[in-house]
Image (spheres, rainbow, N blue to C red):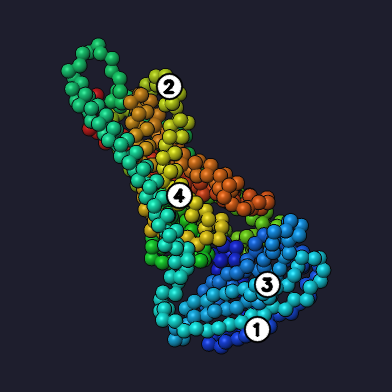
Amino acid sequence: RVKEKKETLGEVLNGDRLVSAPFKLEFLVNKEDEVACKKTLSKVEVARFRSAIIQDYYFEMNYDDLPTWGFIGKVDKDGRDPHEYKYFLYKRVMFDILYNKDRVIEIHVRTDPNSVADLTEDKEVDFQYMYSAKWKETITPYEKRMDIYTWSSSLPHQLEIHLFWNVNSCGTVLLLTGILATILWRALKKDLVKYAHDEELAEDEEKTGWKYIHGDVFRFPKYKSLFAAAVGSGTQLFTLTVFIFILASIGVFYPYNRGPLFKALVVIYALTSGIAGYTATSLYCQLEGTNWVRNLVLTGCLFGGPLFLTFCFLNSVAVVYTATAALPFGMILVIVLIWTLVSSPLLVLGGIAGKNSKAEFQAPCRTTEYPREIPPLPWYRGAVPQMALAGFLPFIVTYIELYYIFGSVWGHRIYTIYNILFIVFIILLIVTAFITVALTYLQLAAEDHKWWWRSFLCGGSTGLFIYGYCLYYYYARSDMDGFMQTSFFFGYMACICYGVSLVLGTVGFCAALLFIRRIYGSIKCE
């Protein structure tokens, strides 16, 4: 009798619906051609199995928490036309199990290509499924039994190619960033020398440059509540990312099971809500905002709202398709309780702490009463061209790694090289900060003082490039099709790219703010 396993939160979020298998694998007991089950397949069942074979369906089984995989059948093409293909369902599997003393170390499953059932025609088929098991001793210690999954996902030659392309792309981008930083430093140094001798200039000489908008550069942006909420949400997601990397580095996540990762994302996101509330409300009050409660609600909904709506739509699609990706009502209730009893209270507490911090905005220059008129600028100094430039270079840093990540999240690859991903993440932050600072300097040099939103949008524009890569990956790299797969891919990737934009937008804004405070603090402002 088939028994259903009681899944954890992470397993349900991963779409796992585990049931007991009809194989009896007692410890150290070899078996040969044991019958697992017998059944006469109807015409409908034959057609369903044939469709599954065509779509390369495979099974996944777990023994002593060790996973193993195998295909359910094969297609015999043999040079024929497609309508002459033959379809076979495997009738026998063989388990090779390695042990060390009283511990299971490895398990491998092989299908017997000579023991098959022909499902080419639409007719009833008598089917008998058999299995064999062989136990072999190994010297591999129990503590290293997971290493095989790391090795299989990063073979030496694949790892070398992976490292080569990452070093090549990151090195190129860092070189360009270094050249840009050198040019920026020399230009800034020249400006500081010039402004230091400003009193020696003629009175009637036209004054231009970033110094002469010191009375407007710290003028607060429009839509300050939305801006503060975006920075708060970006800070929360950045903290979430850092914690995920920490857990990955200490080996919390199994290389073959994404369940613990999804569980960690839900729990850490809820626990870091206070960071979003504090950051957003504190910044909002520094920007002289008055309705901090509305700002707090906006902060809670800015990322969580689109994510919730996307989840509701995609979960409804999964229910219609009767897919395992559909979350049961009980698990949805658990997530709602986490949001109600953990996330929301922490968000409110963080907001109250941010409001009571009474921090003042630190500006080295006083803001004038009336804003300075921004001179006409060429098209390439507009927001869209600068966003395109700001997003392209950081995207190049992540391009190679995205291929492997997508293959793991949306395919059957196993991703285990978290240390490389962490290095790429650090380089991504550095490049984003430098590019945003450089573009902010050019904007101020053109006497355009509306840098607040521009710096955030320039930093976050990388998310748009990643979503553009999603289009390329879906149509050129993946075998996904159908409404459900398409909606899941583009729906959840839209949420992920949106989160990336919030994180990198926050990084870009913070870098630009530190830069502006530093340069205006180094000159004499009248």
The residue indicated by pointer 1 is 33
Helix, strand or loop status at disc 3: strand
| Real-space CA distance between mark 3 and mark 2, rounded to the nearest whole angstrom | 67 Å
Instruction: Specify which label sits upstream in the sequence, 4 or 1.
Output: 1
Disc number for residue 400: 4
| N-terminal-most mark, 4 or 3 | 3
Instruction: Kindly indicate whether the residue at mark 3 contacts the one at mark 4 (C-beta within 8 angstroms).
Output: no
Identify the image quadrant of residue 391: top left
Q: Which residue is mark 3?
A: 90
Point out the tag, 3 or 2, that comes first from the N-terminus.
3
Viewport quadrant of the C terminus: top left
The amino acid type, in three-letter code, at marker 4 is Ile
The percent coordinates of residue 211 (x first, y second) are: 28, 25
- Give the CA separation, mark 3 to mark 1: 14 Å
**Residue occupying image coordinates x 60% and y 86%:** 31
Local secondary structure at mark 2: loop
- Kindly report which numbered mark, 3 or 2, lies closer to the viewer in this rendering: 3
Q: Is residue 82 visible?
A: yes
Q: Earlier in the sequence, mark 3 or mark 1?
A: 1
The image quarter in which residue 336 lies: bottom right
Residue highlighted by disc 2: 378
